Image (cartoon, rainbow, N blue to C red):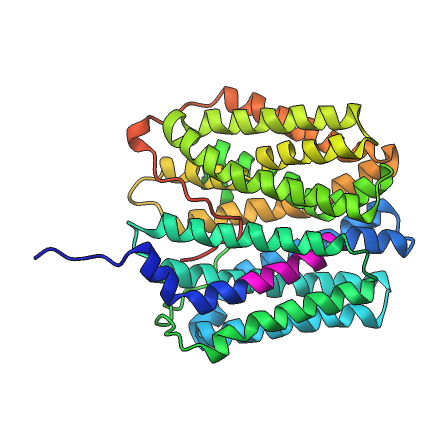
Amino acid sequence: MLQILPSPRKIIKTLTALFVGVGFVFIGNSLVLTSAGVMLSDMGVENFYIGIITACFFIGAILSSIFTYKFISTYGYIRSYAIFTALFAISALLHVLGDNVIYWVFLRIMLGFSYYSIVMVAESWINTRSRNEIRSRVLSFYSTIYYMAFGIGVIILSFKLTPVKIFIVSIFFIIVGSIPMNIIKIKEPKLPPKKKLFIPNVFNLVPLALVTSFSAGILINGFFAMSGLFIIASGGSIADASFFLFAAMVGGFLSQIFFGNFSDRFGRKYAIILSSSIALIASILMYIFMGNMLIMKLLAFLLGFGIFCLYALAAARANDVLSEQDSRVEVGASILLSFSIGSILGPISMGLLMQIFGSSGFVFIYFTFTSFLIIFSIFKETVPKKYRTEYLSTGPSEVLD
């Protein structure tokens, strides 16, 4: 008997409350994540220490990847979502009570832990509800929400809000993001099976996937943490920094569409080379035209187009070479861990170079890692088309499904 599978539209409709909720959370996160560098600079913190403090957000992400799955398997999806959104809002609220840098380090870890825990709940829920045949289309819709919401958040930053107002607005969106899950009837999946805590062995990954995910962590989250400060240091305004971020997010959204098709046709290796080359060219031109804010915003689009697809390409490359015996969960966690390590090092290294070379230090990171990624990729083999898995335009937050 022929089994009729649910359509992506039906799955999306049943998960409306979840999608609406995380959309508001993404807006709140974009505010607290991208504004930190500028706020700390206004507080008189040196660039190197700004990099260290903003990197603590991703220490929280690593802690989330270790502990949150067990929490979900114990308390369920809806309760976990409610608890982590509350913790996220509290973490944002506590910023207004003090400007001590040690205090901010603690709060950034809390923000990273709670935010990535929310995303883990959402993505695990989506994966549980979506069959393999339609999962990519449902996740593409989810990615669209992410980019739209993040873009809205950075546009709000252009309104020149004070730090207190930024946190108030972010808290508003986070709290609103918790409402749909509590007032709209939605059936949560069964509790996932409890598993022993493990630290994945990243060295079991194919080298190209590992290097690409690590580089993506440095380039993407270094961008989120330090790009606002980079534009201010280059002579721009808060509004310029906001639209610089927005242009990069538009480029990142379109790159998922382009490189999904490109990598399926020509291979992940050539997609990584092309995306890295685009980012390299954009960074070189940024160095040449630094201070020209109109050109910088156009180049931000190219930079975002080149770097925001790298994590998905790393995941696709790893899945292309997996054997049937390999653990997809462990590989996914390994990629996330390597990405998270890069995410910690990205803001720190950018902060250090900006401390030494000024605003030029920001683009030096892109010179170095995109060039390395291009050279490293050239000497790796291409996986034949018949062995390639489906490209999924997900971000670096999915840990377990």
Residue 372 locus on image (x, y percent) = 62, 25
Asked if 138 appears above or below 323 in the picture, the reply is below
Name the outermost residue toward the bottom: 183
Closer-to-camera residue (363/260): 260
Magenta residue check for 34: yes
Q: Looking at the rendering, which quadrant does residue 178 occupy?
A: bottom right
The magenta-colored residue range is 23-35
Kindly identify the residue that appears in the image at 60 percent across and 72 percent down. Answer: 176
Residue 5 locus on image (x, y percent) = 22, 57
Kindly identify the residue that appears in the image at 43 percent across and 36 percent down. Answer: 260
Kindly identify the residue that appears in the image at 44 percent across and 52 percent down. Answer: 141
Kindly identify the residue that appears in the image at 72 percent across and 48 percent down. Answer: 225
Closer-to-camera residue (208/279): 279
Q: Is residue 360 visible?
A: yes
Magenta residue check for 31: yes
Q: Is residue 215 left or right of residue 142?
A: right
Closer-to-camera residue (92/144): 144
Where, quadrant-wise, is the C terminus in this rendering?
Answer: bottom left
Residue 211 locus on image (x, y percent) = 55, 34
Name the outermost residue toward the left: 1
Task: Give the number of marks.
Answer: 0
Q: Is residue 176 left or right of residue 355?
A: left
Q: Looking at the rendering, which quadrant does residue 293 occupy?
A: top right
Q: Is residue 346 visible?
A: no
Name the outermost residue toward the right: 44
Where, quadrant-wise, is the N terminus in this rendering?
Answer: bottom left
Q: Is residue 270 left or right of residue 306?
A: left
Q: Main secondary structure of the magenta part?
A: helix
Closer-to-camera residue (180/217): 180
Residue 200 locus on image (x, y percent) = 48, 51
